């Protein structure tokens, strides 16, 4: 009996082993492209839990032996990550991990996604600095340990030995990191050389000195509403030769909007003016009325004539970058910097919400035995190319819009001073009524999630228009030819 029992146990164990092997064999046999695609789609569902920020795109072949890559597109009124893959990636899903890890690392920061969209745009349009920066970011964010681990969790059923296969593909991390760092260092050298050449060319040409010697300065031209004269002056001072493609194209669009404003596509917004920072430009006309114009702090903060202060458009951007790992100067960074600290900014901020701007009005001052206004409420109507949502700001509740550099007198709809805080509500009501009478637009409180959603949609559409602004950069200025 004992031998029979032992034989039965042995047979039983053998059967168990055979069954276990069979089960494992079935799992491996079922692994393949369908399981890889299912894992990818599940990953997309995870990324898009709260809003659609990524999608998949199957292509015939991705060159360079990568078999997957991440590109960006403006879709659903926001930057969208597109994971492109080919048939090899589905058959060998370890090739998907790097792209999945990149998206997992970066997708949640909407503000940074706008900057990354600009970076990808500049790289696609031939900027060597942007190409180096993009490659550096791809390596930096694709090798995040936690993101790689999480990406692999979606593809475990798609292939056997996934960990080992991914490790083999990522074995060159240090070499890639070193290579992309050399690219970035070289980009820095080229950028600094361009900066030096720009300053040298300007010194030799003396074009800016000639403009600064003119009797009519920038503020005079603005108060005269001489849009062509202002645009020509800005065109001479803007540092075209060191701009990235996106920044140059957008500035060209702004100059076009200065010369020929589109009155059919406008934005009406309000600003709380503070006389400590807003040096209001005033011109009394022969009939006793007053013209008003406004400048950004990059022009009001500096010394010298307002024409000479335009040199700061070059010097400020050369001093602005604190991230030594990023050689590219992004316009979206300037947007973000304004929201963080508007001092010495190229932009003037506005809002669609009168209640928001009321908190930014300068405090009344007691002078010569009387109370004087410390600021007021300004309402403008401007070409939508020059007044747009600041999507790089993390303060969506402020519904912040930006205007570059200058507000012309013909863009001012209403301006009322606030002499004491008790009058604020009355002043706001007066401005709102005047805006409605002159433009037909009713300014109302913008609050809650619906207002923020509208703001984000408007910002995405405005940014998309900026991306689609294709101009010939070399035609922007002939100063350095």
Image: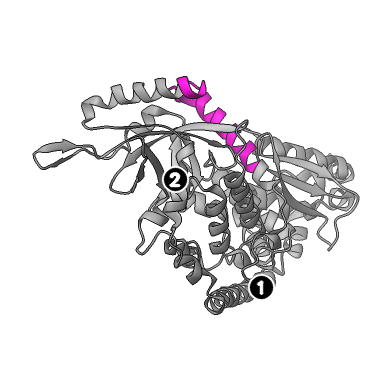
Q: Nearer the viewer, residue 42 or 238?
A: 238
Label 1 neighbourhood size at 10 Å, few (<14), some (14-19), many (20+)?
some
Q: Is residue 50 magenta?
A: no
Q: Is residue 450 above or below residue 34?
A: above
Q: Main secondary structure of the magenta part?
A: helix
Left or right: 248 as drawn, with respect to 169? left
Q: Position of residue 187 (x, y in %)?
A: 63, 72
Label 2 neighbourhood size at 10 Å, few (<14), some (14-19), many (20+)?
many
Q: Position of residue 82 (x, y in %)?
A: 74, 45
Q: Is residue 458 magenta?
A: yes
Q: Nearer the viewer, residue 38 or 189?
A: 189
- The mark found on residue 183 in the picture is 1
* Quadrant that contains the C terminus: bottom right
Seen from this angle, which residue lies furthest front?
286
* Residue occupying the point 38% across, 25% down: 431
Q: How far, Cα to Cα, is label 1 from label 2?
A: 36 Å
Residue range of the region highlighted in magenta in the rendering: 437-464
> The residue tagged with tag 2: helix, strand or loop?
strand
- The mark found on residue 348 in the picture is 2
Q: Position of residue 225 (x, y in %)?
A: 49, 45
- The mark found on residue 27 in the picture is none
């Amino acid at each position: 009996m004992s031998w029979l029992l032992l034989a039965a146990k042995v047979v039983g164990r053998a059967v168990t082993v055979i069954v276990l092997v069979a089960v494992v064999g079935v799992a491996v046999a079922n692994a393949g492209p369908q399981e890889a695609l299912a894992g990818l789609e599940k990953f997309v569902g995870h990324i898009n839990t709260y809003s659609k920020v990524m999608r998949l795109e199957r292509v015939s072949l991705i060159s360079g032996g990568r078999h997957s890559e991440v590109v960006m597109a403006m879709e659903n009124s926001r930057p969208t990550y597109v994971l492109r893959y080919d048939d090899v990636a589905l058959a060998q899903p370890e090739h998907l991990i790097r792209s999945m890890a990149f998206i997992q690392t970066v997708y949640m920061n909407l503000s940074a996604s706008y900057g990354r969209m600009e970076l990808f745009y500049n790289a696609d349009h031939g900027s060597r600095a942007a190409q180096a920066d993009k490659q550096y970011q791809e390596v930096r964010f694709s090798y995040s340990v936690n993101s790689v681990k999480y990406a692999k969790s979606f593809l475990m059923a798609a292939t056997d030995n996934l960990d080992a296969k991914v490790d083999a593909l990522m074995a060159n991390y240090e070499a890639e990191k070193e290579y992309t760092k050399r690219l970035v260092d070289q980009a820095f050298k080229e950028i600094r050389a361009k900066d030096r050449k720009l300053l040298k060319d300007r010194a030799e040409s003396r074009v800016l000195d000639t403009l600064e010697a003119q009797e009519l300065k920038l503020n005079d031209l603005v108060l005269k509403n001489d849009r062509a004269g202002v645009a020509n002056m800005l065109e001479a001072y803007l540092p075209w030769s060191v701009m990235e493609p996106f920044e140059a194209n957008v500035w060209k669009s702004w100059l076009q909007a200065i010369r020929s404003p589109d009155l059919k596509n406008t934005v009406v917004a309000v600003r709380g003016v503070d006389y400590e920072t807003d040096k209001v430009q005033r011109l009394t006309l022969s009939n006793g009325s007053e013209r008003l114009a406004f400048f950004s702090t990059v022009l009001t903060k500096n010394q010298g004539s307002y024409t000479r202060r335009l040199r700061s458009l070059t010097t400020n951007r050369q001093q602005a970058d604190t991230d030594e790992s990023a050689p590219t100067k992004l316009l979206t960074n300037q947007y973000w910097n304004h929201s963080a600290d508007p001092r010495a900014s190229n932009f003037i901020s506005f809002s669609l919400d009168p209640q928001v701007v009321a908190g930014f009005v300068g405090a009344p001052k007691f002078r010569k035995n009387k109370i004087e206004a410390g600021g007021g409420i300004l309402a403008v109507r401007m070409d939508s190319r020059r007044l747009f949502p600041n999507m790089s700001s993390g303060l969506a509740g402020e519904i912040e819009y930006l205007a570059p550099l200058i507000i012309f007198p013909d863009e001012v709809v209403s301006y009322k001073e606030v002499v004491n805080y008790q009058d604020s509500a009355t002043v706001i009501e007066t401005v709102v009524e005047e805006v409605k009478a002159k433009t037909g637009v009713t300014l109302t409180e913008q609050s809650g999630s619906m207002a923020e959603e509208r703001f984000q949609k408007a910002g995405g559409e405005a940014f998309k228009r900026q991306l689609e602004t294709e101009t010939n950069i070399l035609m922007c200025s002939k100063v350095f030819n």
